[in-house]
Image: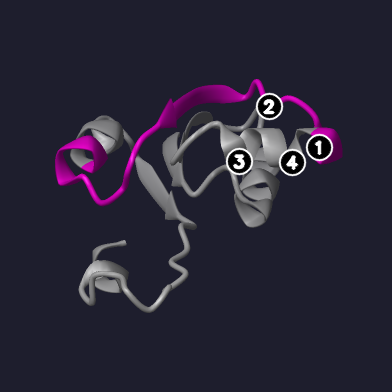
Amino acid sequence: MNIVVFGAGGWVGRAVLADLAGKHQIRAVLRGPESWEKYRSVDGEWRGGEIIYGNIEDFAFTHKVTEGMDGIIHLTVYFPTGDDNDALPFLI
């Protein structure tokens, strides 16, 4: 299967990628490379598929990265800071 994983750079996301490795075609989506750097010393380099950086709030981006996928795994998280857009939790 072709599977896209949103939030792939987090702790749970990396565990999911490890579990899917070698079983499916994976597209890992995360906000930026900082997440990979954060956990690289723990679980090493991931080479199990395609890595795409972008913002899930951008509907055009989200549509583009889900095209051709058979499954979607959504692992993004939202941490409110008090001054955020009230609708944001419902967008991700």
Labels 2 and 1 touching (C-beta < 8 A): yes
Disc 1 designates what residue? Answer: 43
Density class for disc 1 (Cα within 10 Å; few <14, some 14-19, many ≥20) is few
Residue 89 percent coordinates (x, y):
31, 72
Amino acid at circle 4: Tyr
Report the span colored magenta: 41-62
Amino acid at circle 1: Asp
Q: Work out which quarter of the rendered image holds the N terminus and state it.
A: top left
Disc 2 designates what residue? Answer: 46
Labels 4 and 3 touching (C-beta < 8 A): yes
Amino acid at circle 3: Ser
Give the Cα distance between marks 4 and 3.
7 Å
Asked whether residue 53 is drawn in magenta, I would say: yes
Disc 4 designates what residue? Answer: 39
Residue 62 percent coordinates (x, y):
25, 42
Please give the name of the residue rendered at 23% of the width and 36% of the height, measured from the top-left corner.
61
Give the Cα distance between marks 3 and 2.
12 Å
Q: Is residue 90 above or below residue 43?
A: below
Amino acid at circle 2: Trp
Give the Cα distance between marks 4 and 1.
6 Å
Q: Quadrant of residue 2?
A: top left
Please give the name of the residue rendered at 25% of the width and 51% of the height, measured from the top-left corner.
57
Return the disc, 4 or 2, that comes first in the chain's sequence.
Answer: 4
| Furthest residue toward left | 60
Labels 4 and 2 touching (C-beta < 8 A): no
